[in-house]
Image (cartoon, rainbow, N blue to C red):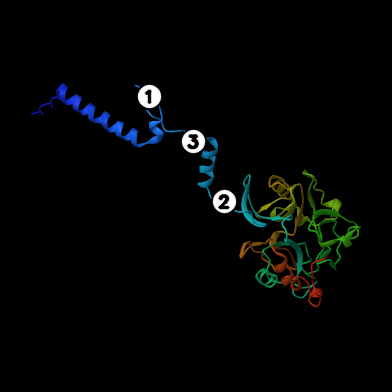
Amino acid sequence: MGTAPTRRGSDGTRRIVRGSILLAVGIWVAATPEVAALPQGPGALPRPARRAPAARAAARVRGTRPARPSPGVSYRKALVGRTPAHVVQVDLRREGIRVSAALTEWGIGGRESWPRFIARTRPTAAITGTYFDTVTCIPVGSMMICGQQVHRGGVRTALAITREGAARFVASRNGLPYDWQRYETLIHAGPRLLTAGRMTLYPKAEGFRDRALFARKPRVAVGLTKSDKLLLVAVSRPIYLRDLARVMRALGAQNAMALDGGGSTGIYYRGKSFAVPRRKLTNLLVVYETEDTYLRSARQLAPSLRDTLLTRPQ
């Protein structure tokens, strides 16, 4: 059986309820000066005041956390098309950032394992350097470390960094650019991949004849963006040089050159190696985030620096 419907209250009951509500509203209006000041005519119900735009913006700011400043040296894994790439970005405009080449503990002609190389030089980030003869262990490219020429090679394209931290890619025919004395860091490698955002890949014109360079293999490159960001890039998947040039351009590099790759491919950032070379290396490109860490480690970058008092050039 269904439940009998409840009967509605009489007219007298409804009047009593309505009166109670009106009495309560009147007491609340009288006790609230902001509301009492509003017109109280029929239908003029009090509305909450709207926040001014500035107040709303202030509320949003208070509710958000302050943005963290971006680090001078950072790492990311990027996917360019179907090619994954390990990317270390170095802000050369950040005070204290230093980029240098590094030799083995025994200097030219020696080779060193990747873990030992990293542990000894203690960089913030590091990547494979220039090519070398696997028999003699002699690098093919010229190098300057802390303003001192430590080796002279024959390849034509170099990453050069001045004492003020300005980087550029330079060419030479004698193993050194004509103004090499103004640079603190210099490492010749190649071939050139990009110039002013355009692909300029002419390995034979730069003196490269080894057929292995033109095969598909893991690759390493260094590039420079419009905003003076140095990009250290390693691709563990075998690719051609032209693919490496496309990767560097997609990552924002305006100028770029290849470094040694294949079994020498390695990249490191803040305690972790994202690619480890299969062979011992003769040189690295290393990054230090502060002036102090650079000066503390500088004597480990080349044997000729161990008895040299290193200070920042004035």
Measured in 3D between alpha carbons, the distance from the residue under mark 1 to the one under mark 3, in whole angstroms, is 20 Å
For label 2, the residue is 66
Mark in front: 2 vs 1 = 1
Tag 2 or tag 3, which sits nearer the N-term?
3
Q: Residue visible at 54% across and 40% down?
A: 57
Q: Amino acid at mark 3?
A: Arg
Q: Which residue is denoted by mark 1 in the rendering?
A: 44
Q: Is residue 285 left or right of residue 207?
A: left
User: Which is in the foreground here, disc 1 or disc 3?
Assistant: 1
Secondary structure category for the residue under label 2:
loop
Under mark 2, the amino acid is Pro
Q: How many marks?
A: 3
At horizontal 26% and vertical 30% (from top left) the residue drawn is: 23
State the residue position of label 3.
51
State which tag comes first along the sequence, 1 or 3: 1
Q: Residues within 10 Å of mark 3 (few under 14, many from 20)?
A: few
Residue 111, given in percent of the width and then of the height, sits at 74, 71
Q: Give how far apart the Cα atoms at labels 2 and 1 are.
A: 43 Å
Asked if one can make out residue 118 in the rendered structure from this viewpoint, the answer is yes
